Every structure is written in structure tokens, then in C-alpha cells.
Amino acid sequence: GKAEGRKSSRATTTRAARMADDGNSTKRLKTSEDDRLIAELRRRNAELESEIEKLRSDVARLSSENAQLSGRGNHEVLPVVIFPPTVDLSRIDTSIVTQITSFVGTSRELLSLALTCKSFGWRQPASSLNLSLVEGVACRAVCSRATKAEMGSLPTYTSGTTTWMSILNRYEHLLDFDVLLANGRRFIEYKNGDPSVVCGCQSYVLNTPSGFSRCTAVTSGYVMTSGVHFAQFDDITGMPCIGIVRPMPGLDADRFDWDFDFFSGMRRMNLDFLAQRSDDWGGSNIHACEYNTLDFTLKWTNWSEEEGSKEGERGCIHPGSDMGSISIVLNLDEGTMAVHDCAYAVHDKVVLKGGLSGPYCWYVKLTQFENIAIKRGTSQT
């Protein structure tokens, strides 16, 4: 029994020793892992401190640059440099500048050029007419382009009051339809806002031959008193009428807001027209003369007893509802009015009326869905 007791005591001692060894081993493993974690944290901390130091350096640099840009730093860092002019326009021959300027073209472009530089817009003391460069170009443009007859319809140059650029602008818009009759209810209007193109709007009026309102547009700003005048009518849709009529600046257009026709035959309207008569009308009894593109006839009237018409010498020269271009020549030196289709040669012009004298303006008459444009013609059209 004593032997068995000794064996049991030795086994217990052995187990206790093994447990002690296992505890020491666990402690050694835990200490080693803690050391590695601490080392990693120290390394990461050093990296962060380095990044922080770099950011501090960048902030300091940017703050310095910001102070310089805002003026709080050294003003010598951003010096102000004034460059001398690259071109002295006063040393350039004005004829060269004038030649270049002549290619600008329109009055608006010349005005823009005058506003860009005083060398262009100010009067030139060396100029015989005391004009600026752009004014000189505008003067030459008007005098070279406008015919003698057209010059009579343009305002006269007056120093300090009427400039050559304003005269050039008026010349560019000489044939605008500036008076719209029967427009009180919007029966007629400009096409796309262009005053040289008019169109009849949708409308219906009782007691008119077609059931649609007749509306009229007049180029009242262009009064033809003598010489030869050329007008070309394009963009023709439908069958509008084209004619000439006496200038009547005092006519109250607002009174005719429904239907307007110089050949209405209405006594009230004829009396209104005759009330505008002036000594300038002269002795001719033809106060309105109208070419009908539908049947190619010409009508004329004196708004009293006498009216007449003449058949065209050709048949249907405009097949279909949409035409090409029509040119009308008014020769007040000879007292004639001629018309031709621009698709034909010049020698195909047909003289439709004679005995014309005194002042006239161009006009067109149209109904709904019709439109027509006017522009300056030439002797070659």
C-alpha cells in the first residue's frame, strides 16, 4: 500500500510541474504579441507626425502666397508692367485706313468701328470736309451707291445734326414698308420682323369681294419725284398687287383698321385721299396705279370720276400660285411705268402706263396667306 501511495504522489507532482510550464509559456507568447503591437503603433505614429509636418509646411507656403496676392506681402513680387502701344495710328496714311474701312459695309458696322477708337470716330482736322474717317467712308458709300433720283429722297447732310452714317442707314432702309394700312386688327404684319417683307394674316371680313380683308403696305419714306426708279419684288406668294400712289403723310392710318384698298371705290375713302392733295401732285390725274399679278392688268384712278385699266400684253407669265421675281421701272422723266418678270430678258418689259408725273411711293396690296418682299432694283433687272 505504501508503494501505491508513493506512485500517486509522484503523478500529482508531475502534473503540477506541467501546469506551471504551460502558464509560463502562455505568458511569454502574450508578452511577445504585445511588443509587436506596440512597435506597429509607434511606426504608424511616426508616419502621421511626418505627414502632419508636411501639411504644416504646405499651409505656411500657401499662406505666404495668399498674402502676396492680397497685397499684404511684398509688393515687389507682382510688379505692374505698362506696355507701350504697338501701333501709332497717327503715323499711318489715312487713305490706307479709309480703304480698309470701306470694306466694313453697313452703317451699323461703321458705327461700331467709330466707337472702338477715337482715331476712327473723331473728326480729322486734315479732312477738307472736317469729317471723321468713318464719316468719310459713309459719305463716299452714299454718293457712289445712290442714284440721283434716290439722293432726292435722302436727308441732307448737316454738320452737327445729320451725319453721313445716319444718311447711309436711311439709304439702306429706303424701301422699307413703313406704313401698314388695315393693321388695326393685325391683318398685315412684317415677316420675321423684316420691314421689307410683309404678309397677310388670317382674316375674314364680310362685304368684300373675296371675303378676306385687303391690306396695304406703303414705302412712304421713299418719295419719287423725278428720274428713273427700279424696284424688285421677291418672295411672292399668292397673287398680290403692286403699285404706286401719291404720298399722303397726313393720312390717319388708324381709321382704316378693317379693310384698305386704294381702289375700293368708296366715296368716303376717296375723299380722305383727295384731302391729302398738295401742290406737289402737279397736273397729272393719275393718283394711284396698280399692277394685278393675278390677271396681269394695270388699273389707275384719280379718286373722283376717272378710272381706267389696261390688259397686259402677255398671257400667264406666272404659272402656279407662287411667283418668282417681278421688276417694275418707274420713269418719271418719261412718265411711264413698265413691268416684267425677272425670268425674262430685259427687252420683254411691257410699258403699261404713260402720263405719270409728280410724286409717288411704292405700295403692295395683299390678302391672307400672301406675302411679298421689296428691294432696290437696278437697270439690269
Image (cartoon, grey):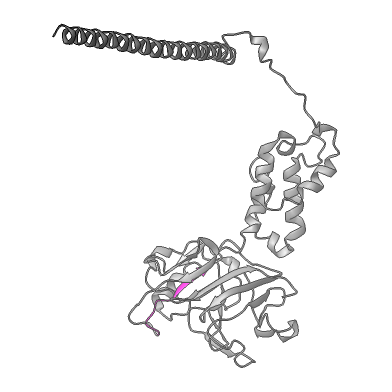
Q: Position of residue 10 (x, y in %)?
A: 23, 8
Relative to 79, does residue 348 appear above or below in the rendering?
A: below
On the rendered image, what quadrant is the C terminus found in?
bottom right
Query: For the point 53% across and 86% down, which residue is it?
Result: 294
Left or right of 156? Residue 188 is: left
In the rendered structure, does residue 185 fall within the stretch colored magenta? Answer: no
Q: Is residue 227 above or below residue 103?
A: below
Q: Quadrant of the N terminus?
A: top left
Which residue does the image show at 39% across and 63% down from the upper left?
Answer: 254
- Determine if residue 361 is in view: no
Coordinates of residue 270 in the picture (x, y in percent): 44, 75
Main secondary structure type of the part rendered in magenta: loop
Image vertical order of residue 194 relative to residue 45, above or below: below
Q: From the viewer's side, name the closer residue of 105 and 128.
A: 105
Depth check: give the residue in front, 150 or 328.
Answer: 328
Q: Residue at x 63, y 55 (%)?
A: 170
Identify whether 161 is placed above or below 340.
above
Q: Where is residue 27? Give x, y as percent.
A: 33, 9
Residue 209, position in %: x, y?
39, 85
67 with respect to 85 (left or right): left
Q: Is residue 200 left or right of residue 285?
A: left
- The residue located at (43%, 81%) in the rendering is 265
Magenta-tinted stretch: 210-217
